Image: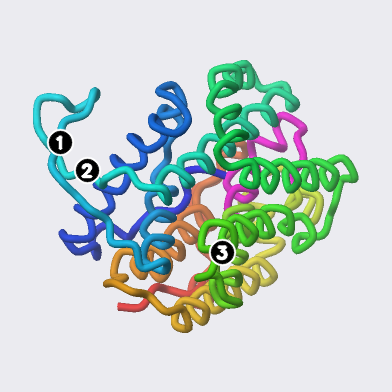
């Protein structure tokens, strides 16, 4: 569930690109401070987006200064300062990485052995933010139960990830949590689960792993599943885009929110179209681009 949330770079202001990278570097240092140095290797840009969102809603100004890091030590670069919110987000990142690798191990994936690298970091999460570990553990167990039951209902399969994001937002935002922030994070979680299932469709079928979209459409490759479920999938994603926009417009931000607007209103629809209409490696088909679906799958606002 990592690596899908990203900006529409050509439409990203330079100031926001600088902020985005500074938040990423700041989270890297925050993970080191809160969960240990090895845990830093699991950092994804998704969490930089979450950091921008949470800091802004909470009204916590991000302090940025130029500094060097172990990887890029030749040149000083803008880095966000370590704070309590960034450390908490680092704990979220570490716990997610640990549980993802545990899940890979259960699925027979070779990379599952890497979970031991993050076990020490996860123990630190248990000490610093046990509620974060509890939320992720409970929802991962709920997800596992649905997979063992071979769930074939899309909305039901999305619930654990959506609820996990919602509960994490309540914990991270605390008194700043509202019905609209919870709805935003809930739908972000639902989108992440669906886009991951769609992106991994061919690989899951090849390895005989659970994939709710295969259970629903029963096709042996993604392009055929998209053709078969085109109307339903386009409707689901369009509804998610609409709900994200609605929540975003109702949330009170304390600072400029061009960066998170770009990612939610442009980056997420762009990533969806890229995965939705991408080629299918397992059956040799090229890019699938049904005209009707392309028109109804929401395009980002100019």
Sooner in the amino-acid sequence: mark 2 or mark 1 = 1
Who's the residue at 11% across and 35% down the image? 76
Marks 1/3: CA–CA distance = 32 Å
Q: Nearer the viewer, residue 13 or 11?
A: 13
Q: Quadrant of residue 81?
A: top left
Disc 2 + disc 1, Cβ < 8 Å: yes
Could you classify mark 1 by the number of other residues whose Cα lies within 10 Å: few (under 14), some (14-19), or many (20 or more)?
A: few
What residue is pinned by disc 1? 67
Sooner in the amino-acid sequence: mark 1 or mark 3 = 1
Q: Quadrant of residue 12?
A: bottom left
Determine whether, in the image, residue 125 is placed left or right of residue 148.
left
Who's the residue at 29% across and 40% down the image? 25
| SS state under label 1 | strand
| Coloration of the structure image | rainbow
> In the rendered image, is residue 292 in sight?
no
What label does residue 247 carry, if any?
none
What residue is pinned by disc 2? 79
Marks 3/2: CA–CA distance = 26 Å
Q: Quadrant of residue 1?
A: top right
| SS state under label 3 | helix
Determine whether, in the image, residue 69 is placed left or right of residue 289.
left
Q: Is residue 153 above or below residue 281?
A: below
Who's the residue at 60% across and 17% down the image? 116
Q: Is residue 134 above or below residue 188?
A: above
Disc 1 + disc 3, Cβ < 8 Å: no
Q: Nearer the viewer, residue 149 or 23?
A: 23
Residue 67 x/y as whole percent: 15, 36
Who's the residue at 35% across and 47% down the image? 83
Q: Is residue 160 above or below residue 66?
A: below
What label does residue 185 carry, if any?
3
Residue 246 x/y as whole percent: 51, 82
């Amino acid at each position: 569930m990592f690596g899908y949330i990203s900006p529409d770079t050509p439409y990203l202001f330079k100031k926001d690109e600088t902020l985005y990278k500074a938040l990423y570097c700041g989270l890297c240092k925050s993970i080191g401070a809160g969960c240990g140095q090895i845990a830093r290797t699991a950092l994804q840009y998704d969490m930089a987006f979450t950091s921008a969102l949470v800091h802004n809603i909470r009204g916590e100004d991000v302090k940025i200064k130029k500094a060097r890091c172990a990887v890029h030590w030749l040149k000083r670069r803008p880095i966000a300062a370590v704070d309590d919110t960034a450390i908490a987000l680092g704990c979220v990142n570490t716990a997610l990485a640990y549980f993802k690798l545990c899940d890979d191990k259960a699925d027979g994936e070779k990379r599952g052995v890497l979970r031991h690298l993050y076990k020490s970091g996860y123990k630190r999460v248990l000490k610093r933010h046990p509620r974060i570990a509890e939320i992720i553990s409970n929802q991962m167990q709920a997800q596992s139960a649905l997979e063992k039951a071979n769930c074939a209902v899309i909305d039901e399969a999305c619930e654990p990830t959506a609820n996990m994001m919602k509960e994490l937002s309540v914990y991270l935002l605390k008194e700043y949590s509202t019905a609209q922030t919870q709805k935003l994070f809930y739908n972000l979680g639902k989108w992440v689960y669906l886009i991951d299932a769609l992106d991994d469709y061919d690989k899951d079928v090849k390895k005989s792993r659970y994939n709710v979209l295969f259970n629903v459409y029963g096709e042996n490759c993604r392009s055929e599943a998209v053709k078969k479920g085109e109307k339903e999938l386009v409707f689901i994603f369009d509804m998610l885009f609409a709900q994200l926009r609605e929540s975003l417009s109702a949330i009170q931000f304390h600072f400029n929110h061009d960066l998170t607007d770009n990612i939610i209103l442009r980056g997420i629809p762009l990533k969806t179209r890229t995965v939705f209409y991408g080629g299918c490696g397992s059956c040799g088909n090229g890019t699938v681009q049904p005209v009707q679906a392309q028109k109804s799958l929401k395009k980002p606002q100019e």
